[in-house]
Image: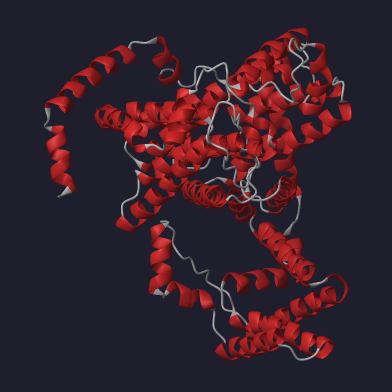
Amino acid sequence: MDNKFLIQQYTSSRMSQCLDKICRLFSKLWAQSIFYHMIFVNPFRLQLQESLTFRIFFWPFQQLNVVATKFDAKYIRDSFILRHFRNYLYMLMRINSTLIGAFMLTVAVYELATAGVSAPALIIFLIAIIFLIAKVDMIELISGSAIFTKLFEMADFKIVCIDYQANKVLAATYGVALGLMCSALLAFSGVVAAFAVAAGLTIVGFVFLNPVYGLYLLVLSGPIFDTKLILGLTVLVIVSTFIRNLLNTEHKWFLDDIGFILMGLLIVYFFSAVLSFQRLASLSIFAVYVLFIGFYIVGLQLLTSREIIIRCVKLFVIAGTLVSIYGILQYVFGWGINQNWIDPSVFSITDRAYSTLDNPNILGVYLILAFMITAGVLLTRKTPHAIFFYACALASMAICLGATFSRGCWIGLAIAIAIFITFYNGKLWGLAIIAILLAPFILPDSIIERILSIGNMEDTSTAIRVKIWLSSLRMGSDFFLTGAGLGSASFGYLYPFYTYYYIPAQHSHNAFFQIFIEGGVIGLVLFLFSMWRIEKHLALCFNKYKRSETGIIALALMCSIVGFFVQGLFDYPFYNYRIVFLFWLIITLGSTLCKRGECDKNFTRM
């Protein structure tokens, strides 16, 4: 049956008309509410950028801009080494067969000369010869391929070919040089280390060629790779951004209201770390916070066009899809499943998925962000291929979130979806109510069992949380102004002196309690202030652009943050440092999207 006919039948039904009247009534009451005026009215009543404190905080960035104008970077940009390194990277971007063939041939000859004749070495040798004979840039073949074109269309990406004509002699020279380097490493460290070094140097080159490439890689790898790798890549992107802004005067440092507030929050965290009972551990965590929370300011410098922001949003969805698929496979096949997260005396389930994020609750809170953003992207796609792709991505996240069996995450997502439906189109509540009524007949018994256990004090995870909350608040009250120090080491050191029930804990299992404990009341106020500002920006952006791509994704981001903190009432997701990075990445994307939606020019600069 035609979908348009079904939609027409629904909109003309009495239920739809009744819902329309209810929505109008609630819309009228909402427009008269205090909360509406706090979020949607008087968007810039607090002119933070005009304050003396803001000017003091912005002064270092002004000095960087001044230094850049006086620094003669022409000789550095045009130096022999950088010129050839750029050529090498451009050839890689075009997937030049001569470069790749020369590299493979050099490695194959080394293997044949040192290890003797072997099938892998001969195969590499033959492929290298084919690549050398072909003398093509394979990106052009890919862009002309119907299969690759369809694959990219499904994710709503375009294959971009940079305008660069490769010199065949130079391409062969670069390939041989890279092959010789790998061959030397093979002699001392093995295959994995040799190719890891070559890949690592290439990635470093791409990031310094354009820090935005590093940002794309961070978005993709954030939920997948180890924290140390994410930290290293974050440092690399920050350093490359500083160098880019120094060498290119077209890029100026700037600061906005949220960045200003976050600088204040980091100062509070610094004093909290210095005064901590576990100073060394707290200072190391402070360093992580500086990189991951401070990355917001660097992100402002990189997300300077709406195209870059939307591309990052789509990459975030793709990363979430990969994490979800792995989580589903992990749950189905029992790959490394840990049963310590389930109370067997209350529940019949024995396994929970945690995918690449080490903990089912952490996976769940990440999927709240990914699910809502995917929903926003899905509703803005135009082609059937893209709609199908993002619908499948959304389904994989929903299934994986179910496999986490995280009740707090389910509640957070449900509230996020409810807010999204209400603002996007209140009439959809008719379908939502039908879905809620059908849910008990569709959902697996294990999920129904888990939902019905919400609030059950016989469940140890619920009972323990309540006791930890009471003990944590007692601790926080004694460090009201300064905070008790950053991280689980400081919390774990002090907690035994405050616990009522002799229950061990490494954090308070509540995001707001933990922020209060770590940063004191000033840290909590600054954090809540920054969250209010970003939610206000996103709400205003949606209110202005409504049904456009910018407006819908802004609404999805706004709801994802709300859902994140609803789950944060039951757990403390920031103890996982990758979640710290991913959360502030979402804040950065949301803030810059609002600015790019508001004007076509670059951000306002001091």
**Residue 34, position as x, y percentages in the image:** 41, 10
In the picture shown, does residue 327 fall above or below 159?
A: above
In the picture shown, does residue 229 fall above or below 403?
A: below
Judge whether residue 296 can be spotted in this image.
no
Q: How is the image coloured?
A: secondary structure
**Residue 419, position as x, y percentages in the image:** 39, 26
Residue nearer the viewer, 570 or 151:
570
In the picture shown, does residue 371 fall above or below 492?
A: below
**Residue 577, position as x, y percentages in the image:** 69, 37
Residue drawn at x 31%, y 51% is 382
Residue drawn at x 60%, y 86% is 131
Residue nearer the viewer, 332 or 465:
332
Residue drawn at x 41%, y 56% is 156
Q: Is residue 498 left or right of residue 1?
A: right
Which quarter shows the C terminus?
top right
Res 527 → quadrant: top right
Judge whether residue 398 can be spotted in this image.
yes
Res 272 → quadrant: top right
**Residue 214, position as x, y percentages in the image:** 64, 53
How many labels sit on residues?
A: 0
In the picture shown, does residue 527 fall above or below 327?
A: above
Residue nearer the viewer, 214 or 477:
477
Residue nearer the viewer, 178 or 436:
436
